[in-house]
Image (tube, rainbow, N blue to C red):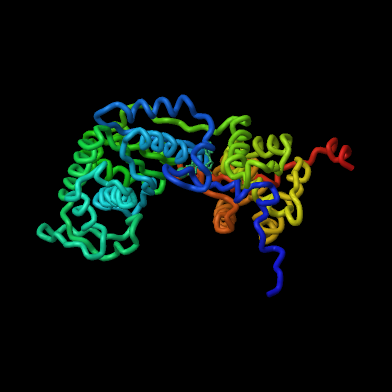
C-alpha cells in the first residue's frame, strides 16, 4: 500500500494524544477533555452549588453569549453534585421548538432513563419496579398503556433511536411517572435531583409562554432543581414572559467571558491532561503575544479563541511543530478566510460584510444609512451573507433585526506588527 504522509495525527508533534482545542462542552461523566481542565467561575460555582445543595427544589436560569462556557459551567457543578450523591442525568437535555409539553416531560424522563441504563448499581437510585416502568416507555418491546388516548410521539427524544413509533400515554400519567421516579430517587439518595435543559433560545417566545403555562406544576416538582440555559436571545425572552421569570428562585446567572489568564490556563491544563507521557514535554503551538492578539480580537470568547488557534495550527503544521507568533497567526488566518469564504462573495456583499464586522451588532436600517444602499438590497445581501455563514442574527427587538459577523470574519481585522516583522526578518 502507498504511504500517505498526510494521514497522521498532527497533535503528536506537540506531545499530546489528541486535539487540545476541541470546543465541545465538558461532560458530567467521561469526555476526552477531562472536567479537571475547567478553570475559574469560583463564585458562580459556589452560588449554584448552594442552590442545588439546599433541599426542596428550585428553578435557575443561566445565560450568556454563545460559546462562553455556559454548558460546561453547569456540567461542572452537576459533576460535583453527582460525586456527592445527587442524581442527575449525564447528557444535558437540548430543548427543541417542536416540543409540546408532553415532549418536554418525555424527554426529561428519557434523559433520566438513559443515565440509569448505564449505571451498573441502579439500586442505589431506583427500584426494579419503577426502572422497568421507565424502560417500558423507551424500549422497543414495551407494553403500551392506551386507556386515555393522548398521543405522545417518540420523535425528538434524545436517546435510544429505537424510540420511533407512537406511544399512547396520557399527559398526566407522564407527569405522574416523573413524580414517582423523583420520589424514589430522592428516598434512596436522600438528596435532590438536578435536571438541566440546554439552549432555551431554540424555543420561540410564544412556545416558551405556552410551555411555562402548561408545565407550571411540573417545574414545581418537589426535590428537583431545574436549571435552564440560554443565550442572550433567551434572556430577552425570559424578560418578556412573566410566567417564566416568576418561577425562578433567584436572579439569573450571567456567564461572562473568561479573563486572559484563565484562557491561558485552560489551554495549558488541556495540554497537561492530554500529554502523551509524563516523560515527554508538550509544546504549546503559540507564544503569549499571539494568544493575547486572538483573545482581544474574540473579546475573550473561549470557543472562538480555541477555534481560531486550532484552524491556524492545523493549517501550518506539516512535518514539525510550529510556534505561532502574532504575525504568522494574522497572515495564516487572513489567508484562510480569503480562500475559503470571502473569495466567493460579490463586491457588494463584501462591502456590506466589511461594514458589519466593524460593529458589535447592526440593523438593516443602520447599514442602509451608512452605505447609502437601499433597504431592500441590504436585505437580500444579508440573506446571501447569512447563507454563506458570514453573518448571523444576534437578536431581534420588535421588527429590528441585529446582525453580527461570524467570528471567523473578524480574522480580517487582524493586523501584523511591523516591529515584530523587522525583528524576525
Ligand atoms: N471555565 C472553563 N474552563 C475550561 N474550559 C472551558 C471553560 N468554559 C468553557 N470551556 C470550554 O470552552 C468551550 C465552549 O464551552 P461551552 O460549550 O460550555 O459553551 P456554551 O456557552 O455552552 O456554548 P453554546 O452557546 O454554543 O451552548 C468548550 O470546549 C469548553 O470545554
Ligand atoms: Mg452550550
Residue 358 appears anywhere in the view: yes
Residue 161 located left or right of residue 341: left
Quarter where residue 293 is shown: top right
Residue at the extreme bottom = 1
Out of 149 and 276, give the one closest to the viewer: 276
User: Looking at the image, how many numbered discs can be counted on the residues?
Assistant: 0
Q: Position of residue 275 (x, y in %)?
A: 62, 44
Quarter where residue 262 is shown: top right
Residue at the spot x=38%, y=36% of the render? 83
* Vertical order, 211 against 382 (above or below): above
Residue 372 appears anywhere in the view: no
Residue at the spot x=69%, y=41% of the render? 281
Q: Please state, as top left, top right, bottom left or bottom right, where the N terminus lies in the image.
A: bottom right
Residue at the spot x=76%, y=56% of the render? 319
Residue 149 located left or right of residue 369: left
Residue at the spot x=88%, y=39% of the render? 422
Residue 344 located left or right of residue 106: right
Residue 369 located left or right of residue 399: right
Quarter where residue 180 is shown: top left
Out of 193 and 293, give the one closest to the viewer: 193
Out of 341 and 165, give the one closest to the viewer: 165
Q: Position of residue 260 (x, y in %)?
A: 63, 31
Residue at the extreme left = 147
* Vertical order, 37 against 105 (above or below): above
Q: Position of residue 103 (x, y in %)?
A: 27, 52
Q: Position of residue 38 (x, y in %)?
A: 52, 36
* Vertical order, 159 against 230 (above or below): below
Q: Please state, as top left, top right, bottom left or bottom right, where the C terminus lies in the image.
A: top right
Amino acid at each position: 500500500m502507498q504511504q500517505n504522509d498526510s494521514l497522521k495525527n498532527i497533535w503528536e508533534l506537540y506531545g499530546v494524544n489528541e486535539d487540545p482545542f476541541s470546543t465541545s462542552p465538558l461532560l458530567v461523566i467521561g469526555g476526552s477533555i477531562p472536567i479537571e481542565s475547567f478553570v475559574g467561575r469560583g463564585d458562580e460555582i459556589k452560588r449554584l452549588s448552594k442552590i442545588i445543595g439546599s433541599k426542596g427544589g428550585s428553578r435557575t436560569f443561566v445565560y450568556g453569549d454563545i460559546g462562553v462556557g455556559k454548558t460546561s459551567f453547569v456540567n461542572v457543578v452537576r459533576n460535583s453534585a453527582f460525586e456527592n450523591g445527587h442524581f442527575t442525568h449525564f447528557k444535558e437535555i437540548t430543548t427543541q421548538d417542536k416540543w409540546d409539553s408532553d415532549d418536554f416531560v418525555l424527554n426529561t424522563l428519557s434523559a433520566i432513563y438513559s443515565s440509569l441504563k448505564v449505571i451498573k448499581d441502579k439500586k442505589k437510585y431506583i427500584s426494579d419496579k419503577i426502572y422497568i416502568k421507565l424502560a417500558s416507555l423507551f424500549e422497543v418491546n414495551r407494553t403500551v398503556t392506551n386507556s386515555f388516548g393522548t398521543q405522545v410521539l417518540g420523535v425528538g427524544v434524545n436517546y435510544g433511536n429505537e424510540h420511533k413509533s407512537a406511544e399512547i400515554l396520557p399527559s398526566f400519567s407522564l407527569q405522574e411517572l416523573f413524580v414517582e421516579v423523583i420520589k424514589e430517587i430522592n428516598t434512596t439518595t436522600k438528596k435532590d435531583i438536578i435536571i438541566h435543559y440546554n439552549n432555551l433560545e431554540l424555543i420561540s417566545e410564544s412556545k416558551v409562554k405556552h410551555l411555562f403555562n402548561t408545565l407550571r406544576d411540573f417545574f414545581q416538582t418537589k426535590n428537583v432543581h431545574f436549571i435552564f440555559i440560554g443565550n442572550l436571545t433567551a434572556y430577552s425572552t425570559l424578560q418578556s414572559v412573566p410566567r417564566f421569570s416568576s418561577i425562578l428562585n433567584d436572579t439569573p446567572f450571567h456567564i461572562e467571558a473568561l479573563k486572559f489568564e484563565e484562557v491561558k490556563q485552560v489551554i495549558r491544563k488541556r495540554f497537561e491532561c492530554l500529554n502523551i507521557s509524563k516523560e515527554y514535554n508538550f509544546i504549546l503551538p503559540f507564544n503569549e503575544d499571539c494568544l493575547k492578539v486572538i483573545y482581544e480580537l474574540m473579546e475573550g470568547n473561549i470557543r472562538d479563541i480555541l477555534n481560531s488557534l486550532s484552524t491556524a495550527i492545523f493549517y501550518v503544521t506539516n512535518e514539525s511543530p510550529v510556534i505561532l507568533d502574532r504575525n504568522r497567526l494574522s497572515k495564516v488566518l487572513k489567508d484562510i478566510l480569503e480562500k475559503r469564504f470571502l473569495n466567493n462573495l460579490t463586491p457588494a456583499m463584501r462591502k456590506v460584510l466589511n461594514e458589519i464586522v466593524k460593529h458589535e451588532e447592526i440593523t438593516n436600517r443602520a447599514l442602509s444609512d451608512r452605505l447609502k444602499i437601499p433597504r431592500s438590497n441590504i436585505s437580500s445581501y444579508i440573506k446571501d451573507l447569512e447563507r454563506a455563514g458570514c453573518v448571523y442574527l444576534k437578536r431581534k427587538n420588535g421588527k429590528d433585526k441585529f446582525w453580527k459577523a461570524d467570528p471567523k470574519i473578524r480574522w480580517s481585522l487582524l493586523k501584523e506588527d511591523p516591529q515584530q516583522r523587522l525583528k524576525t526578518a
